[in-house]
Image: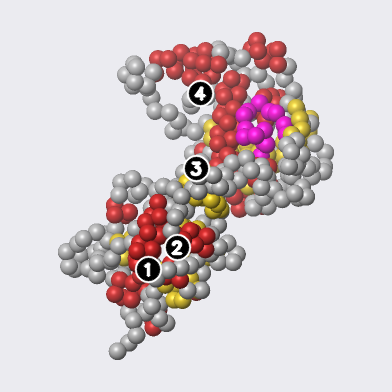
Amino acid sequence: MSKEPVRYCLWSFREDVLIEADPDTGAVILHSQWGDTALPPVTEPAIWEALQRMSLGPILLENVTRDRADLAAIERVLERLEHLVVRSIGVDADRPLFSVVPLTPQASFALTDLAEDRMIRLSRFAVLQSNGSRYHLESSLSLHRVILHETEAVDLIAALGRPVRPSAIVASPLSVAGLPTAELLSYLVAAGMVVVAEPAEAGRPAVFSEDVDPALTFWRPVDLMFHVRTNLGRHDEEFGMTYPREEGLPIEPVVAPRRGGPAIDLHRPRLPELFAADPPFTAVVEGRRPVNRSDESVPTAREVGELLYRTARVRSFYEEAREGHPRATLSERPYPTSGSCYAFEVYIAVNTCSGISRGVYHYDPVRHQLEPLPADGAGVDELLEAGRIGAGLRAQPPLLMVITARFCRLSWKYDGLSYALVLKDLGHLTQTALLVSTAMGLPADTVAGSDIEMSARVLGTDWRTESSVAAVVIGTQAEYGRPPGGESGVNDADWADEAAAILARKPRRR
């Protein structure tokens, strides 16, 4: 008769938990990143000993006391603290296989027995990662993290890549090593990493609720994880304006360094003239829709200068100094951005433009100049062709504005949401560019998607540190455009037509 695997259920607190007794009231205070949790004065020595030992690492409650009443009392206290309690399981008291860590104050953990007639599998939202020293599992649908301490635990995860019956896992070679596999599966289900199929008739394919839930079917796992991790509420990572950059490491400069070569001075419009000549703001907003162009003239260098000046120039610099954090230079520009960091660089791919030769240029927002880049004709064609396809055009656009992000301009200051802020700030920049171009009478449209590999090669950047994130075609608009207006009051077609008429009376400033 084979020996039954021995299970060791271990208990500990999250690493950020600190325990102390109030000297006046005797209450037990547990400090954590979510604030303080108070317990009434603890009179039972076994409970106090268990709490203290759990703050040092995983323990067997049976090593604290063998008395059943004391064990029951300890578990009742721990039920009140389940958002702070780490549940581990192992093959001996000193070697946990994996640990289940709560991520929020709302995390709840309850073990259930698995029915043999129900298939199980790893959730399609579960992500296996390494932090350089150990593996861990996370899911955007779970309020727990599973830390895998041993290779046997990783083997178990590998065996759950497709639907299987619990008995198939229990009878696998994993159990030969003495692992309490059935118990492990229960922990993974309770942690939300393994899902159980819906009840089904014999011979029917297994159906998992996460595959048919209307709230989940449209989510790709990576997109849902990005949404969860760049907002608060479902994770325990550092988040916000934390200044995570290590002291002594340089901060990315506020403006990208020049690469050398003669630059082209651009036209600087006079703001009083713009105030007098621009159409009303409402006409610009309501009239920004595709138009039938009768003016086939190419954009001019003067128009490029005005567009970039009004959209992306540096208006001023200032210093930010906070105690305990590195001193940084920030800037102020026509569009809003997070923390005045301004992570974006603007490049212009020129196809046809009066006054500027065909090629690729980097915009210097301080000197208001275009710096030619050593891109060959094939590289220029690649950028313009990508813009043509992304904007749905029949021919390559006269100009393509490529926007890249220098990610470290935000990540030195923000933790957890820096890339989300890149995308939000990107909306500010692209909308500003489109509204300015509309006010100028210069057609423009956004491009769907970016080829980060090709653009990095043509622009001469490292896509890991500076990558294309958006593009705008200038001098033309997509023909599919906005659908025609319907009944008055539904699409406001009459109002939009009136706005377009106002814009038509404002000639292009060349």
Q: Which mark is residue 232?
A: 3
The CA distance from mark 2 to mark 1 is: 9 Å
Nearest the viewer among 260 and 180 is 180
Q: Considering the numbered disc 4 on the image, is that residue within a helix, a strand or a loop?
A: loop
Q: Given this view, does label 1 or label 4 mark the residue nearer the observer? A: 1
Image coordinates of residue 136 in percent, x first then y, are 50, 62
Q: Residues within 10 Å of mark 3 (few under 14, many from 20)?
A: some
For image coordinates 74% across by 38% down, the residue present is 323
Residue type marked 2: Ala
Q: Given this view, does label 2 or label 3 mark the residue nearer the observer? A: 2
Q: Is residue 68 magenta?
A: no
The residue to which callout 2 is attached is: 46
Residue type marked 4: Arg
On the rendered image, what quadrant is the N terminus found in?
Answer: bottom left
Magenta stretch in the rendered image: 330-343
Q: Given this view, does label 1 or label 3 mark the residue nearer the observer? A: 1
Give the mark, 2 or 3, whose residue is nearer the N terminus. Answer: 2
Q: Give residue 193's quadrant in the image.
A: bottom left
Q: Is residue 338 magenta?
A: yes
Residue type marked 3: Leu
Give the mark, 2 or 1, whose residue is nearer the N terminus. Answer: 2
Give the mark, 1 or 3, whose residue is nearer the N terminus. Answer: 1
Dots 2, 1 in contact, CB < 8 A: yes
The residue to which callout 1 is attached is: 67
For image coordinates 28% across by 65% down, the residue present is 113
Q: Considering the numbered disc 3 on the image, is that residue within a helix, a strand or a loop?
A: loop
The CA distance from mark 4 to mark 3 is: 35 Å
Nearest the viewer among 41 and 462 is 41
For image coordinates 39% across by 18% down, the residue present is 493
Residue type marked 1: Asp
Q: Which mark is residue 288?
A: 4
On the rendered image, what quadrant is the C terminus found in?
Answer: top right
